[in-house]
Image (cartoon, rainbow, N blue to C red):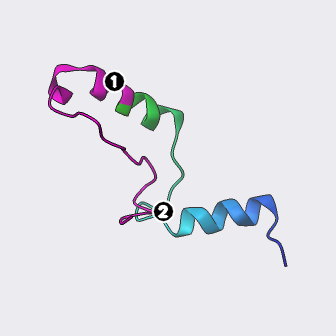
């Protein structure tokens, strides 16, 4: 049985460590950090902005 859109969204949020969906502000904050001097040593990385839903490969 397929989940409805709202049910799927809630199920995906439930598997995160933060128990919340990512927001545009979360994405903007990461982009701002990566564009700044504190991120100068970060190279060639895949950064998952998903509330800890996938903690391993």
Could you tell whether 42 is left or right of 51 in the image? left
Q: Is residue 41 magenta?
A: yes
On residue 17, the disc is none
Residue 12 drawn above or below residue 42: below
Q: Find disc 1 in the rendering and name its residue.
A: 32
* First along the sequence among labels 1 and 2: 2
| Tag 2 secondary structure | loop
Could you tell whether 27 is left or right of 43 in the image? right
Image quarter in which the C terminus is found: bottom left
**Residue located 43% across and 37% down the image:** 26
On residue 19, the disc is 2
Point out residue 42 in the picture as x, y percentages from the top left corner: 21, 34
| Tag 1 secondary structure | helix
Mark 1 against mark 2, which lies toward the viewer? 1
In this view, the residue farthest toward the front is 44
**Residue located 20% across and 29% down the image:** 39
Could you tell whether 4 is left or right of 11 in the image? right
Circles 1 and 2 in contact, beta carbons < 8 Å = no
Image quarter in which the N terminus is found: bottom right
Residue 41 drawn above or below residue 1: above
In this view, the residue farthest toward the top is 36
**Residue located 23% across and 20% down the image:** 36
State the extent of the magenta-drawn residues as a range: 31-57
């Amino acid at each position: 049985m397929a989940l409805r859109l709202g049910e799927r969204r809630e199920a995906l949020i439930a598997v995160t460590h933060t128990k919340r969906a990512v927001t545009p502000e979360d994405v903007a904050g990461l982009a701002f950090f990566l564009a700044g001097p504190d991120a100068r040593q970060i190279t060639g990385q895949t950064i998952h902005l998903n509330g800890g839903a996938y903690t391993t490969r």
